[in-house]
Amino acid sequence: KYLLYYMKDELLDELEMVPYADGKLSWMSPPTGGPHERYVEHINEMPGAGESPLFFGMHPNAEINFRTALCDKVCDTLSMLAGGASAGGDDEGVSPSSVAEAMCGEILEEVAEKKFATDDVSRSMSDEEKGPYQFVFLQECAYMNGLVAEMVRGLQELALGFKGELTMSPQME
C-alpha cells in the first residue's frame, strides 16, 4: 500500500535528475511510451554525457587534479619507455631493457623457491578433517604451484634472452 501511495506517474515529471547542480544540468524527463531508440537518443543528448562531476554532487573542478595526475603518470611512463630521463631523476640514462632485466631478476629471486606444500598438508589431515573447503584449498594451492612454476620458467627463459644465450622471440619481447 505504501508503494502504491508514493509511486505515482507525477513523481518523475520534470524531476531534477542531477542533485546539487542548481539547474546547470537539468533536462526534461524522457518521453514515455516511445521506442528504445528514442530513449537512447535522449540519453545521448544529456549535457555532459554522464561524465560531469556535477552528476556525482561534486564541484565542477573536482576532476582537474585526477586528470593532471593521470597525465603526469602517462608522460612519465612514455618517457621511461622511450629511454629518456624520468621524473624521478635517479634512473637517468637507464635503458628500458636494463630496467626490464633488473625487474626480471628481482621477481625471479622472489618467487623461484616459493612452493605450497600441498602433499604435506594433505597427509597431515585425517579423512574426517577433510571437507569441501579443505579440498578446494588444496586444489587452489596446486593451481598456484602450477602458476608459480610457469612464471619461473618464463622468467628464466627471459633472463637467458637478456644474457644473449637465447634468441629473443616476439613473445619474449
Image (cartoon, rainbow, N blue to C red):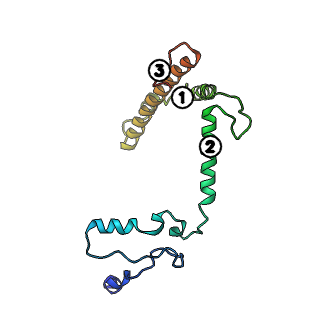
Tell me which corner region of the image, top left, top right, bottom left or bottom right, holds residue 5. Answer: bottom left
Q: Are marks 3 and 1 in contact (CB under 8 Å)?
A: no
The residue under the point 57% across, 26% down is 108
Badge 1 marks a residue whose secondary structure is loop
For the residues bearing labels 1 and 2, Cβ distance under 8 angstroms = no
Q: Is residue 53 left or right of residue 126?
A: right
Amino acid carrying label 1: it is Lys
Q: Residues within 10 Å of mark 2 (few under 14, many from 20)?
A: some
Q: Is residue 115 left or right of residue 71?
A: left
Amino acid type at mark 2: Cys
Q: Could you tell me how far apart the alpha carbons at marks 3 and 2 are, in whole angstroms? A: 28 Å
The residue pinned by badge 2 equals 75
Reading the image, the residue beneath label 3 is 169
Q: Quadrant of residue 171?
A: top left
Note whether residue 84 is visible.
Answer: yes
Above/below status of 75 relative to 52: above
Mark 1 residue crowding within 10 angstroms, few (<14) / some (14–19) / many (20+): few
* Mark 1 or mark 2, earlier in chain: 2
In this view, the residue in front, 100 or 152, is 100
N-terminal of the two: label 3 or label 2? 2
Q: Residue at x 58, y 27 (%)?
A: 104
Q: Residue at x 42, y 31 (%)?
A: 142
> Mark 3 or 1 closer to N-term?
1
Q: CA distance from mark 1 to mark 2?
A: 36 Å
**Which kind of residue does numbered mark 3 sit on?**
Ser
Residue matched to label 1: 114
Judged from the image, the secondary structure of the residue bearing numbered disc 3 is: loop
Above or below — where is 78 with respect to 51?
Answer: above
Say which quadrant the N terminus sits in: bottom left
What residue sits 35% from the left and 85% below the top? 10
